[in-house]
Amino acid sequence: MAAARKSLFARLRDDPRGVSAVEFAMLAPVMIAFYFGLAEFCQGYMAQKRMGHASAVVADLVAQSDSIKSSQMADVFKVGDLVMKPFSSAPLQQRASSLTRDANGVVKVDWSQGAGMTARTTGSTVVIPDGLIANGESVIMTEVTYDYDSPVDYLMPAITRFSQTYYLRPRTVDKVGYTN
């Protein structure tokens, strides 16, 4: 009986026909995990790129204006929401501000408007990248954050916050005006 068992195990060990099935059973879970991880990473990356594009679009629309009203800013922020499609725009927070560097080189807020984000205080100082504007010049700054919650939650179980700041000079005037 022991000889029969030994010959059965010896035959199974020496038989190459099941090697492919065993290799597949070992590699399949790893490959499936890589696939879902890559799909989740791509979704997060796409949400981040759309959020950055929303920041650029909002800045561009404001920079094209000579003067902008509060009601027009609400419409501009709605465009930012539309850029996020197919992702939800609920976690999107936006703020647009007009900044001017004074004669002393201090950058101050001329006006600010936010959607889901608190507007900056008029007259407050802001730090911007060096060399962006000279004394007496103005720039439109948009700040956008997006809280991305992965639908799968395998690799990114917590909410990931993306943020983008975008600067654009006014196109047709020295400084974009603002009225309520």
Image (cartoon, rainbow, N blue to C red):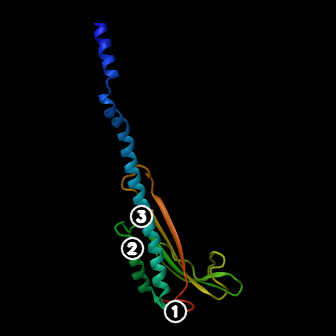
Relative to 19, say whether 154 is above or below. Answer: below
Q: Secondary structure at mark 3?
A: helix
Name the residue tied to disc 3: 46
Question: Which callout, 1 or 3, points at the residue further toward the start of the chain?
Answer: 3
Rate crowding at label 2 as few (under 14), some (14 to 19) or many (20 or more) other CA atoms within 10 Å.
some
Counting from the top left corner in percent of width and height, residue 67 is at 49, 91
Amino acid type of disc 3?
Answer: Met
Q: Are marks 2 and 3 in contact (CB under 8 Å)?
A: no
Give how far apart the Cα atoms at labels 1 and 3 are. 33 Å
Q: Position of residue 55 (x, y in %)?
A: 47, 74
Between the residue at mark 2 and the residue at mark 3, the CA separation in whole angstroms equals 12 Å
Does residue 180 show up?
A: no
For marks 2 and 3, the one nearer the N-term is: 3
Q: Which residue is mark 2?
A: 83
Looking at the rendered structure, the secondary structure element under dot 2 is helix
Residue at the spot 30% in from the left edge and 12% down from the top edge: 5
Circle number at residue 172 = 1
In the rendered image, residue 25, in percent from the top left (x then y), is placed at 33, 35
